[in-house]
Image (spheres, helix red, strand yellow):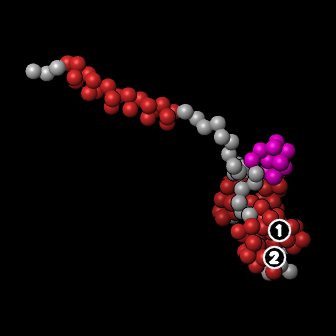
Amino acid sequence: MFNKNHILTGLALPVAAACALLTGCATTSSTPPLYQWDAYQPQVHEFFKGQKSSTEQIDALEKARQQALGAGKAALPPGFHAHLGALYASVGNSSSAKQEFAAEKQSFPESSAYMDFLSSHLK
């Protein structure tokens, strides 16, 4: 014969585990993001699609930088300064490009060799 209490007890553990798992998935993290990606990723996408001119992209990234710095948001993401520097280089603004490459190098030292390479090829 079947023992109803044994069946209910046998089901209780898997049901409790499933509830705990689903509850864990439903909670939101209170940890703030490390980097501010909001404006950077769409600009890179538009760069590769050729939807905006370099000056329009520079303006959008400069605006994003000001918003991130002004609001005390997360830091600018890896590649932000490098991309902005490449855009400045594409419009012939070598001094701003070098400043951005230096900022990328300072923020992310692992990019030093590449930033030095890019800076050495500026006119």
Asked if the residue at tag 1 contacts the one at tag 2, i.e. Cβ–Cβ closer than 8 Å, the answer is: yes
Closer to the chain start, of discs 2 and 1, is 1
Q: Foreground residue, 62 or 55?
A: 62
**Magenta stretch containing residue 73, yes or no?**
yes
Q: Tell me if mark 1 has few (under 14), some (14-19) or many (20+) residues whose alpha carbon lies within 10 angstroms of its own.
A: many
Q: Main secondary structure of the magenta part?
A: helix
Q: Foreground residue, 116 or 52?
A: 116
Say what secondary structure mark 1 lies in.
Answer: helix
**Nearer the viewer's eye, disc 2 or disc 1?**
1
- The quadrant holding residue 7 is top left
- For image coordinates 22% across by 23% down, the residue present is 6
Q: Foreground residue, 116 or 64?
A: 116
Query: Which labelled disc corresponds to residue 102?
Result: 1
Q: Tell me if mark 2 has few (under 14), some (14-19) or many (20+) residues whose alpha carbon lies within 10 angstroms of its own.
A: many
Q: Is residue 109 left or right of residue 96?
A: left
Residue under circle 2?
Answer: 119
Q: Is residue 107 left or right of residue 37?
A: right
Say what secondary structure mark 2 lies in.
Answer: helix
**Which stretch did the figure color magenta?**
64-74
- For image coordinates 58% across by 35% down, the residue present is 28
Please give the count of numbered marks on the rendered protein: 2
Q: How far apart, in angstroms, are the residues tagged by discs 2 and 1?
A: 9 Å
- The x, y position of residue 32, in whole percent, is 68, 42
- The x, y position of residue 105, in whole percent, is 78, 67
- The x, y position of residue 47, in whole percent, is 70, 63
Which part of the image, by quadrant, shows the C terminus? Answer: bottom right
Q: Is residue 105 visible?
A: yes
